[in-house]
Amino acid sequence: MSLLVLVEFKTRADGEATFLRVAKALAAEAATEPGTLRYQWCTTQKPGHYSIIEEYVDADAAETHNHHVEPLLRELFGVADLVSIQFFGALNKYLRDWSTGREGVTVNTPL
């Protein structure tokens, strides 16, 4: 079963241009990853808020993605705050550890 991840970010003051550049770079990197099925950035109705739909073959592929783009993720989190993240699917230890105790995280596991 695949892992679907829905994330919302809010850019910080004067960080939107950097955020957009980094988001496009992340999408370009994700396009080369064999375990990434979908990686689509979207604007929202709220100014400065952006969402992303990520889908991976499994949690290990999501972990591989995060390690692969770690420098870009650090840059993204330097100009934006995580509003929420929803996981749909089984998490591996890496993602369970990352999400434990973090605000705005919802984990939806298969029945």
Image (tube, helix red, strand yellow):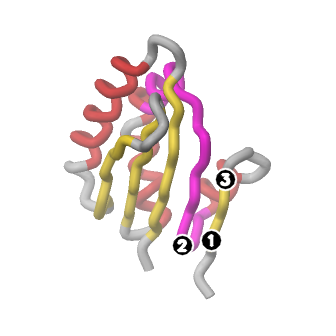
Using a 10 Å C-alpha cutoff, classify the residue at mark 1 as few (fewer than 14 neighbours), some (14 to 19) or many (20 or more).
some
In 3D space, how far apart are the residues under numbered discs 3 and 2 (Cα atoms)?
13 Å
State the extent of the magenta-drawn residues as a range.
Answer: 73-92
Name the quadrant containing residue 27.
top left
Q: Nearer the viewer, mark 1 or mark 2?
A: 1
The image shows residue 14 at horizontal and vertical percentages of 45, 11
SS at circle 2: loop
Q: Circle 2 is placed at which residue position?
A: 89
Q: Which mark is residue 105?
A: 3
The residue under the point 44% across, 34% down is 70
Amino acid bearing label 3: Val
Q: Secondary structure at mark 1?
A: strand
Q: Residue at x 43, y 39 (%)?
A: 50
Q: Nearer the viewer, residue 66 or 12?
A: 12
Task: Find out whether the residues at labels 1 and 2 contact each other: C-beta distance under 8 Å.
Answer: yes
In contact (CB < 8 Å): disc 3 and disc 2: no
Residue 68 image offset from top left, x and y in percent: 37, 41
Q: Is residue 21 above or below residue 49?
A: above
Which kind of residue does numbered mark 2 sit on?
Answer: Gly
Residue 80 within the magenta-colored segment of the rendering? yes
